[in-house]
Amino acid sequence: MLVVTRKINEAFLLGEDVKIVILDIDSERVKIGIEAPRSLKILRAELLREVGSLNQEANVADISVLSQLGAVTGQTELAAEALQAELEK
Amino acid sequence: MDILTRIFGKITINPDQVLQFPEGLPGFETLRRFTLVDLEQTRPFVWLQSLEQDVALPLISPFMIQPDYSPDINDDAIAEMDLEREADLMVYAVVVIPPDVSRMTANLAAPVLINMKNNRGCQVIVEDDRYPIRQPIFTAVYAGPKEDSDHARGDP
């Protein structure tokens, strides 16, 4: 890994199209500006990992989720009916 | 073709219902072929069912959660799908349905895009504070959109 030391407002270039600027530094975090073509994908590394684990979470483990959804819909309908009855009084 | 699924039992897929995801999905990078399963009893959810493994992700229209949903999608993602007309594009959010269904959330930061014209799809990630990866959706889905609570808090 190439390691580069920079001060605030100093920058470095990646290839010809990408410029990375150090905007601010405090004890725990560094604020970085990126100038790059719109077509370049820029992602915080942990975000891709989070989306992957969310997808795996979404892959429901068993069929009971369907009956639960049914139950919720049923309850909603019942609640709506109760409300309707209440309004008609 | 017939596939056997844990959730839906045996389902029959016509060739024109096969969706290609050339890059797979985050978390399921090896899966390339999916289909959409739309069951009346689980609407408004539809299911992105893999044809290669018994994997099924519930999806919902993000516009049901945020009517003005308009993430800034990377031009390359659109180009890779050969999207010619916006009218061909379907947009979905992946839903996590935990045992307590009232805590269900949708991932608004990583919409699933499908070009219905050529059946190509991908999941893109958008960096935008308006679109959290765990947006609670139970109230919006089962009781219609509610007032913006931040706005309500801001008013004296």
Image: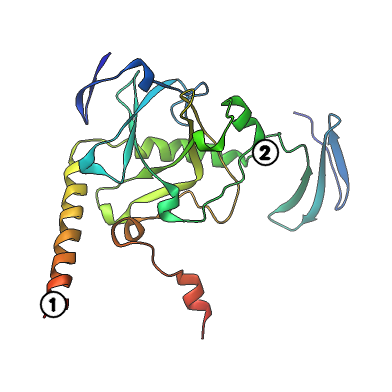
The answer to whether B133 appears left or right of A60 in the picture is right
Q: Which callout, 2 or 1, points at the residue further toward the start of the chain?
A: 2
Up-down relation of residue A7 to residue B116 (above or below):
below
Residue B33 image point, x, y percent? 41, 20
Q: Nearer the viewer, residue B95 or A85?
A: A85
Q: Nearer the viewer, residue B99 or B117?
A: B117
Query: Furthest-top residue in view?
Result: B1
Up-down relation of residue B3 to residue A89 (above or below):
above
- Exactly how many numbered labels are in the figure? 2
The answer to whether A87 appears left or right of B14 in the picture is left
Pointer 2 indicates a residue of which chain? A
Say which residue label 2 marks.
A42
Residue A88: which disc? 1
**Same chain letter for marks 2 and 1:** yes
Judge depth for marks 2 and 1 and give the one in front. Answer: 1
Residue A39 image point, x, y percent? 71, 34
Q: Amino acid at mark 1?
A: Glu
The answer to whether B114 appears left or right of A15 in the picture is left
Residue at 69% x, 54% y is A29
Residue at 86% x, 50% y is A7
Could you tell me which quadrant the N terminus of chain B lies in? top left
